[in-house]
């Protein structure tokens, strides 16, 4: 159903200037990631990724869901770009699947993979939508995991090679390059709690993985900058300067961390989690050093001798924009001792709520009793710290709804780090959307969530933060990692059986926000 066929239910365009106007040129986007939307996992020479493997392990993904088909964006991207254009998006943030470009993670380039992304990019450009390309959104080629994965330094070197290949092919037409999405999830959920692929539970290895993800970022930036801004033209290509220069970024998912009480033990717990959630990435990227307290906190797990001379300078290479993915703040408290079962309940993490049936999925049944509830902490050495369940209001996934946390986060980063332009590269919420008898999908909770966070973004700008844009997570419902298809984050509804797309009310509302460059 196109925009024109749907009732205009969103924010009435009053003709008045919006109460919360955004700066001219503010980027209005929506985001997806390759494994979550593409499907076509065996087509055109794509190799297997760690998510193909992980999603087949019993009990790791809710309902045994996989990204095999996902929402078939690989084939349906022309239709999806048309929807983006109808909404008036200025930018689309997507990721390239490394296993499509190098099926084994190294060695020969698979031209068919590059051709796919060139077609996607050209379709976006023809529609007047700026492509914002992420090189790594968690789908590591399985062959590289078999060779050691991110805990192995070699993976960082391979990532830089891969970045150079994609950059040579698309650097002449893509201006915004993001190396890695959320090294925290790739590193700590992948190798400490094991909640995400590859499902390893080895806290010291997780810290090595974090370092090598950051190193891979720095090496990739160096490789792309060395190639020149002309893409295929390389250093000899047409020189571009100033506003026409390509921009480089990384996207993190930092969060405000508050102690449950003012007791010294809880304050200490908050400091430790802040170290491992936020400063472990922000400090090396923007200050060129790891936080001393975080190194001391983790000294029993590792001596950090895998940080080689020069690594921190590589990681600290200048970037043009820092991407911020924000969902919720966390409250933490010190426990008397490590949780038994080495576990923190996922329910208490606010990551899921197994007491609710997973009604969001049309693909499978409801509750999956084999799906794991207890996992070790994602924060290495922090099994004695509870990440507390958020207070109401919460999303369908049990994540806290707290727009003030976004103001706090953006102003903190602006204050604590050298001036770096910021971009909200993900923000959004899962709710159990239902179509009405007329086919309309009313999602007032999502509109309220997005409006609250956009007003928070507006406030941060008023407080002096150099915020350049905002991307809704997600353009459309998709495969939500360990939650499978049970969590719908899209502003576009997807019928997972047929692939049919329909605009939710939130999409129509966002269209009006974009048209007005602001909201009331
Ligand atoms: C972020 C991920 C994104 C999506 C949202 C809900 O951590 O980057 O892929 O799953 O969470």
Image: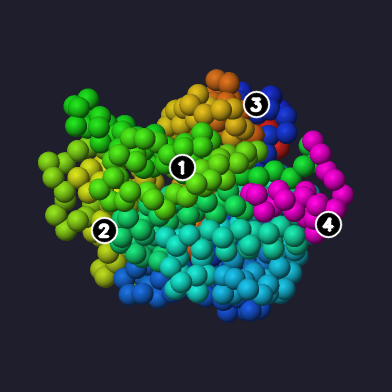
Q: Which mark is residue 233?
A: 4
Name the foreground residue: 405 vs 316.
Answer: 316
Q: Secondary structure at mark 2?
A: strand
Give the residues in magenta. 221-242
Tell me which label, 2 or 3, sits earlier in the chain. Answer: 3
Q: Can residue 62 be found in the magenta stretch?
A: no
- Res. 368 visible in picture: no
Judge whether 192 appears above or below 338 on screen.
below
Residue 59 locus on image (x, y percent): 31, 71
The extreme right residue here reads 238
- Callout 2: 10 Å neighbours few (<14), some, many (20+)? some
The residue carrying mark 2 is 375
Q: Which mark is residue 21?
A: 3
Name the foreground residue: 190 vs 239.
Answer: 239
Measure how far apart labels 2 and 4 are at the Cα level: 48 Å
Tell me which label, 1 or 2, sits earlier in the chain. Answer: 1
Q: Which image quadrant for residue 404? A: top left
Residue 325 locus on image (x, y percent): 50, 43
Q: Secondary structure at mark 1?
A: helix
The residue carrying mark 1 is 281
Tell me which label, 4 or 1, sits earlier in the chain. Answer: 4
Measure how far apart labels 4 and 1 are at the Cα level: 33 Å
- Res. 178 visible in picture: yes
Q: Secondary structure at mark 4?
A: helix
Mark 2 in CB contact with mark 4 (< 8 angstroms) = no
Measure how far apart labels 2 and 3 are at the Cα level: 44 Å
Q: Which image quadrant for residue 196? A: bottom left
- Callout 1: 10 Å neighbours few (<14), some, many (20+)? many
Judge whether 152 appears above or below 505 on screen.
below
């Amino acid at each position: 159903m196109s925009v024109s066929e749907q009732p205009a239910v969103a924010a009435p365009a009053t003709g008045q200037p919006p109460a919360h106007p955004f700066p001219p040129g503010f980027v209005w986007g929506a985001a997806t990631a390759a494994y979550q939307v593409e499907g076509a996992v065996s087509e055109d020479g794509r190799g297997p990724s760690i998510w193909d493997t992980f999603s087949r392990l019993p009990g790791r993904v809710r309902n045994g869901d996989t990204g095999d088909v996902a929402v078939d964006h690989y084939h349906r991207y022309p239709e999806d770009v048309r929807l983006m254009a109808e909404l008036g998006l200025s930018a689309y943030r997507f990721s390239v699947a490394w296993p499509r470009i190098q099926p084994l993670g190294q060695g020969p380039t698979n031209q068919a993979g590059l051709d796919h992304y060139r077609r996607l990019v050209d379709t976006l450009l023809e529609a007047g939508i700026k492509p914002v390309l992420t090189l790594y959104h968690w789908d590591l080629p399985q062959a590289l995991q078999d060779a050691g994965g991110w805990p192995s330094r070699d993976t960082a070197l391979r990532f830089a090679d891969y970045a150079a290949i994609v950059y040579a092919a698309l650097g002449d037409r893509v201006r915004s390059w993001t190396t890695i999405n959320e090294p925290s999830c790739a590193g700590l959920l992948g190798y400490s709690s094991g909640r995400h692929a590859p499902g390893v539970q080895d806290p010291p290895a997780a810290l090595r993985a974090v370092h090598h993800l950051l190193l891979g970022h720095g090496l990739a930036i160096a490789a792309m900058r060395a190639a020149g801004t002309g893409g295929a033209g390389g250093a000899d290509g047409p020189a571009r300067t100033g506003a026409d220069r390509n921009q480089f970024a990384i996207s993190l998912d930092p969060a405000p961390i508050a102690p449950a009480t003012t007791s010294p033990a809880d304050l200490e717990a908050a400091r430790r989690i802040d170290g491992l959630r936020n400063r472990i990435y922000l400090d090396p990227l923007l200050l060129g050093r790891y936080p001393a307290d975080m190194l001391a906190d983790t000294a029993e797990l590792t001596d950090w001798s895998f940080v080689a001379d020069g690594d921190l300078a590589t990681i600290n290479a200048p970037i043009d924009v820092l991407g911020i993915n924000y969902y919720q703040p966390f409250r933490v408290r010190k426990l008397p001792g490590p949780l038994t079962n080495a576990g923190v309940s996922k329910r208490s993490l606010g990551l899921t709520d197994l007491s609710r049936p997973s009604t969001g999925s049309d693909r499978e049944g409801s509750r999956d009793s084999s799906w794991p509830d207890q996992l070790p902490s994602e924060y290495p050495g922090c099994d004695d710290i509870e990440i507390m369940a958020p207070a109401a209001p919460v999303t369908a996934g049990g994540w806290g709804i707290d727009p003030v946390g976004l103001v706090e986060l953006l102003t903190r980063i602006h204050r604590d780090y050298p001036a770096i332009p910021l971009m909200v590269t993900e923000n959004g919420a899962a709710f159990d959307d239902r179509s009405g008898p007329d086919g309309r999908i009313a999602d007032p909770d999502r509109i309220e969530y997005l409006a609250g966070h956009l007003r928070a973004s507006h406030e941060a700008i008023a407080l002096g933060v150099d915020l350049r844009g905002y991307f809704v997570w997600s353009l459309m419902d998709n495969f939500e990692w360990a939650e499978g298809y049970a969590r719908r984050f899209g502003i576009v509804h997807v019928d997972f059986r047929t692939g049919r797309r329909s605009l939710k009310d939130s999409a129509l509302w966002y269209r009006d926000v974009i048209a007005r460059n602001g909201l009331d």
